[in-house]
Image (cartoon, coloured by chain):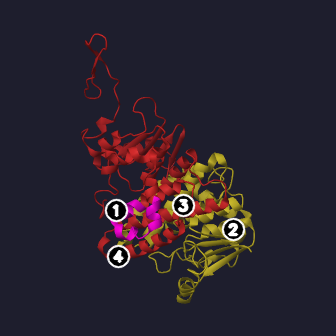
């Protein structure tokens, strides 16, 4: 018979032969609880959803970003996909988080300090695309040596970045209402061109899954939340999104609290998502 | 057929590509689209959707069968073509500096292309952060000679041009130090010095941004 207690507190375990109970101390599991106001803070809940990683033992890979999707979610997808142990470090986008980042920003040994950052042993990277490509090399999600595949991949990478930048600009725009229509028209045009290019897929490079598929998945998913009718006109893109959505390595994440609750943008945005 | 770069008659996002090609001292085609109504028509109503570009945009590169858009994709392609890619040990550092330089240039772009009623505020935000950026870039580049140390790469042409743009926007931040020394070193490379010193150097006539922007960055009078 197994009892359960709060983490960090002794668990009650029964021995099999005699049925008598003895107490066995559980190892204390660090959760940076002191960083957050309460363990019920949404960030704490999402931080605890360290799916695919162990909370004990030494973790040499840390990925740190705000507790948002914004432009930091793709490395998290690559890490979830890989099955590798990693620390999902999330900084709440509020005063407490800003002061934590303010204290840490110049103390992490980052050459060009910013969020997101990745620390993998001795290697420290900032700039989301640089982090994405680092993980893509690590996890075999690069396009390979064929020059045709490389240029295709890199163009889509930048097109995806452009999609995200335009969407972000609108979401944070003081003139959101005035600029919304023009944004939607331009976005539909770009989405249509991308849709034609992707064709039957299933992935951007056809049969081969690469990091740009995760970029298209995440950034288009964000835009889809805002403008589902427009995005869903692009059948090939929607099909690619479904392929990524169905990857077995990601199912634990899609069933998690983290996935269900994490916002796209900060709370001051005109569209939070 | 030589490599062709198409872009407006400004420096903007294409100039790193042009500078890299000048450095290689190979023949290339500078397909300039004049910044006039006729020029705009020739692109928007003429070439843009008729060139076989998968994602019609400027700048574009045509190299035989290869047709590319997106500055970063073009620069990486030229890096591979001309042996100007980072070494394997430096790929991540190269990506980092490439992205950082793009971020700096896009941040400047946000100021220059702001609406008139937002320009002063955005300029002030940009300048507030600039000293720190110059300092951290200075530490990264150090004595160089190049951004990634001993080897010149395509990233150096992004760095040279974009730092030069920011220096024109705010000269006070670029009086001395490793970043200024880096810019001067790059401009002194023989193939580039020839360009910068020439009578018809485009930097003597081209704006940095669109003439319609809040800060076109026209060359200062000699």
Check if mark 2's residue and mark 3's residue have beta carbons within 8 Å.
no
Q: Are marks 1 and 2 on the same chain?
A: no
Q: Is residue A227 visible?
A: no
Q: Chain of mark 2?
A: B
Q: Chain of mark 1?
A: A
Residue B190: percent from left, percent from top: 74, 64
Q: Please tell me whether mark 2 sits on a helix, a strand or a loop.
A: helix
Q: Residues within 10 Å of mark 3 (few under 14, many from 20)?
A: many
Check if mark 1's residue and mark 2's residue have beta carbons within 8 Å.
no
Residue found at x 70% / y 69%: B22
Residue found at x 55% / y 49%: A136
Measured Cα–Cα span from mark 4 to mark 3:
29 Å
Q: Report the span colored magenta.
A: A220-240
Q: Are marks 4 and 2 on the same chain?
A: no
Measured Cα–Cα span from mark 1 to mark 3:
22 Å
Residue B49: percent from left, percent from top: 56, 80
- Where residue A204 is drawn, which disc sits there? 3
Residue under pointer 4: A181
Q: Are marks 4 and 3 on the same chain?
A: yes
């Amino acid at each position: 018979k197994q009892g359960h207690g709060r983490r960090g507190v002794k668990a009650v375990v029964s021995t099999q032969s005699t049925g008598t109970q003895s107490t066995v101390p559980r190892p204390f599991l660090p959760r940076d609880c002191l960083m957050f106001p309460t363990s019920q803070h949404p960030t704490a809940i999402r931080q605890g959803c360290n799916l695919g990683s162990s909370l004990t033992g030494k973790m040499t890979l840390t990925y740190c970003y705000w507790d948002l999707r914004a432009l930091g979610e793709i490395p998290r997808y690559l890490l979830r996909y890989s099955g590798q142990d990693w620390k999902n470090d999330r900084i709440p986008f509020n005063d407490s988080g800003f002061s934590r980042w303010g204290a840490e920003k110049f103390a992490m040994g980052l050459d060009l300090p910013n969020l997101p950052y990745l620390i993998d042993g001795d290697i420290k990277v900032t700039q989301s695309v640089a982090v994405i490509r680092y993980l893509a090399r690590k996890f075999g999600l690069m396009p390979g040596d064929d020059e045709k595949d490389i240029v295709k991949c890199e163009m889509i990478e930048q097109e995806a970045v452009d999609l995200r930048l335009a969407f972000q600009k609108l979401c944070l725009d003081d003139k959101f209402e005035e600029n919304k229509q023009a944004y939607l028209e331009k976005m539909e045009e770009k989405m249509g061109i991308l849709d034609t290019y992707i064709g039957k897929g299933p992935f951007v490079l056809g049969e081969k899954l690469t990091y740009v598929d995760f970029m298209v998945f995440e950034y288009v998913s964000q835009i889809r939340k805002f403008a589902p009718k427009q995005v869903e006109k692009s059948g090939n893109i929607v099909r690619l999104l479904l392929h990524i959505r169905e990857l077995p390595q990601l199912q634990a994440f899609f069933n998690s609290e983290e996935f269900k609750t994490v916002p796209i943008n900060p709370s001051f945005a005109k569209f939070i998502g | 057929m030589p490599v062709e770069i198409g872009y407006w008659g400004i420096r903007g996002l294409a100039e790193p590509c042009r500078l890299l090609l000048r450095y290689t001292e190979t023949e290339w085609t500078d397909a300039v689209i004049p910044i006039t109504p006729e020029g705009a028509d020739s692109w928007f109503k003429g070439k843009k959707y008729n060139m076989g570009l998968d994602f019609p945009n400027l700048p574009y590169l045509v190299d035989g069968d290869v047709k590319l858009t997106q500055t970063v994709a073009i620069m990486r392609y030229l890096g591979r073509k001309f042996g100007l890619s980072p070494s394997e040990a430096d790929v991540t550092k190269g990506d980092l500096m490439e992205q950082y330089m793009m971020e700096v240039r896009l941040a400047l772009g946000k100021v220059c292309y702001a609406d008139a009623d937002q320009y002063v505020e955005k300029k002030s935000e940009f300048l507030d952060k600039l000293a720190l950026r110059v300092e951290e870039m200075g530490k990264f580049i150090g004595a160089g000679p190049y951004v990634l140390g001993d080897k010149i790469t395509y990233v150096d042409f992004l760095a040279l041009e974009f730092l030069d743009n920011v220096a024109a926007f705010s000269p006070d931040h670029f009086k001395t130090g490793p970043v200024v020394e880096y810019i001067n070193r790059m401009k002194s490379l023989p193939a580039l010095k020839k360009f910068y010193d020439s009578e018809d150097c485009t930097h003597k006539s081209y704006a940095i941004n669109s003439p319609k922007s809040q800060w076109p960055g026209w060359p200062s009078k000699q």
